[in-house]
Image (spheres, rainbow, N blue to C red):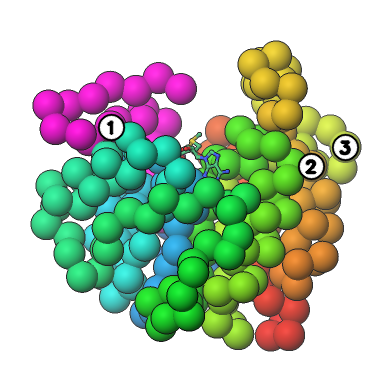
Amino acid sequence: MSFGESDDQRLVFPAAGRNVLPIADVLKLHLPKSGRVLELASGSGEHAVAFQQRFPELVWQASDPDPQHCRSIDAWRAHYALTTMMPAALPIDVRDRPWFSHDRAEFVFDAFVCINLLHISPVLCTDQLFEGAAEVATNDAVLMIYGPFMRHGAHTSVSNAAFDASLRQRNSAWGLREMEWVSSRALAAGWSLTAVETMPSNNFTLVFGLDDNI
Ligand SMILES: C[S@@+](CC[C@H](N)C(=O)[O-])C[C@H]1O[C@@H](n2cnc3c(N)ncnc32)[C@H](O)[C@@H]1O
């Protein structure tokens, strides 16, 4: 991942600048009007601050296990003077459950957003994402996952096939996941696929809802 760093701790991920608008447009279709959103794997925090400002009625809780990324999220948050509607970043690793050690209202969420994690993490993270989110979700919560996916056993583009090969070369536990497999892992944790949104550059947004509410 290439990124630059400004004088403060704000990181800049070029891909985030390219995909922030199309992702926000799709989030708008599925996010509740108000409530609390937990973003997993927030990275630099550029998405988080953009989304909180685009959806000002939502509390946007960003998180990432990388301390440098948490510092960047908080620096972006300070840069835009976002306070109560964007709490400080939390160091959540989806594999470390429960994600919260206390039952508190601020640790229950109406929506979950996860951008570009599943292909850059071991398959275990996919299960842990769905299971962890189900543990802290309201009954009508939505969970949205953005990234590149295989579909029906095949890559959706030549460039995705090359990207998949390069990921697997970097780390044998990484790689593009099959949409149908992701959806089966969601079901095992109580989430049903409700929409598949086609995104620019051969990406998708997968939208899930809790089974009891569909
Ligand atoms: C490709 S970056 C995506 C960052 C951001 N969502 C974006 O699209 O710009 C992947 C992010 O996943 C985070 N990550 C890696 N393993 C994780 C895990 N087990 N749980 C939560 N986040 C993880 C990394 O720290 C990194 O910030």
Q: Earlier in the sequence, mark 1 or mark 3?
A: 1
Q: Earlier in the sequence, mark 2 or mark 3?
A: 3
User: 214 or 48: which is nearer to us?
Assistant: 48
Q: Is residue 188 above or below residue 199?
A: below
Q: Is residue 58 above or below residue 212?
A: above
Question: Residue beneath label 2, please?
Answer: 178
The picture places residue 181, in percent across and down from the top left corner, at: 83, 49
The picture places residue 105, in percent across and down from the top left corner, at: 41, 83
Q: Are marks 2 and 3 in contact (CB under 8 Å)?
A: yes
Q: How far apart are the two marked residues, 2 and 3, measured between alpha carbons?
A: 7 Å
Q: Is residue 7 above or below residue 149?
A: above
Q: Which residues are magenta?
A: 1-24
The picture places residue 208, in percent across and down from the top left corner, at: 66, 66
Tell whether position 3 is magenta.
yes
In the figure, is residue 210 to the left or right of 92? right
Q: Is residue 58 visible?
A: yes
